[in-house]
Image (cartoon, helix red, strand yellow):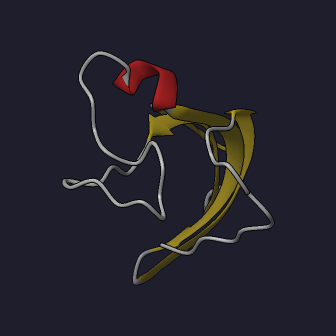
Amino acid sequence: MEYRFLFTKIFRGALFTDAGNVWLVRNNVSKPGGVFEWETFYEQLAMDVGLGLRLDITFFCTSFRFGFSCKKTMVNPGKQMGMG
């Protein structure tokens, strides 16, 4: 879910929240707990909240977003960076 608001004519802000995970179809011994199970999937959902800044010009648009974990589900999270 995302709420966008106007800063200036070309800059917009956003507040967002996100939840999800990635599961395996088949069991894999190197990834314990990775198989989707209907009874416990809600316990495996990761959640985050964040904010973003969006540059929106008629022919070009880019955004920078920063998210903060509310609920971590990874065994060894380490540092991560995502682009997309």
The quadrant where residue 6 appears: top right
For this rendering, which residue is in front, 10 or 26? 26
Residue located 35% across and 60% down the image: 28
**Left or right: where does residue 66 sit relative to residue 41?**
right
For this rendering, which residue is in front, 64 or 19? 19
Residue located 71% across and 44% down the image: 51
Q: Position of residue 57 (x, y in %)?
A: 51, 75
**Left or right: where does residue 78 sit relative to residue 34?**
right
Q: Residue furthest front?
A: 29
Q: Position of residue 78 (x, y in %)?
A: 79, 63
**Left or right: where does residue 74 sit relative to residue 28?**
right
Residue located 73% across and 56% down the image: 76
Q: Residue furthest right?
A: 79
Residue located 68% across and 37% down the image: 72
Q: Position of residue 84 (x, y in %)?
A: 47, 72
Q: Is residue 60 above or below residue 31?
A: below
Q: Residue furthest left?
A: 25
Q: Is residue 10 above or below residue 70?
A: below
Q: Residue furthest top?
A: 39
Q: Is residue 74 above or below residue 69?
A: below
Q: Is residue 49 above or below residue 43?
A: below
Q: Position of residue 37 (x, y in %)?
A: 27, 29
The total number of labels drawn is 0
Residue 3, visible in the rendered structure = no
The quadrant where residue 4 appears: top right
Residue 19, visible in the rendered structure = yes
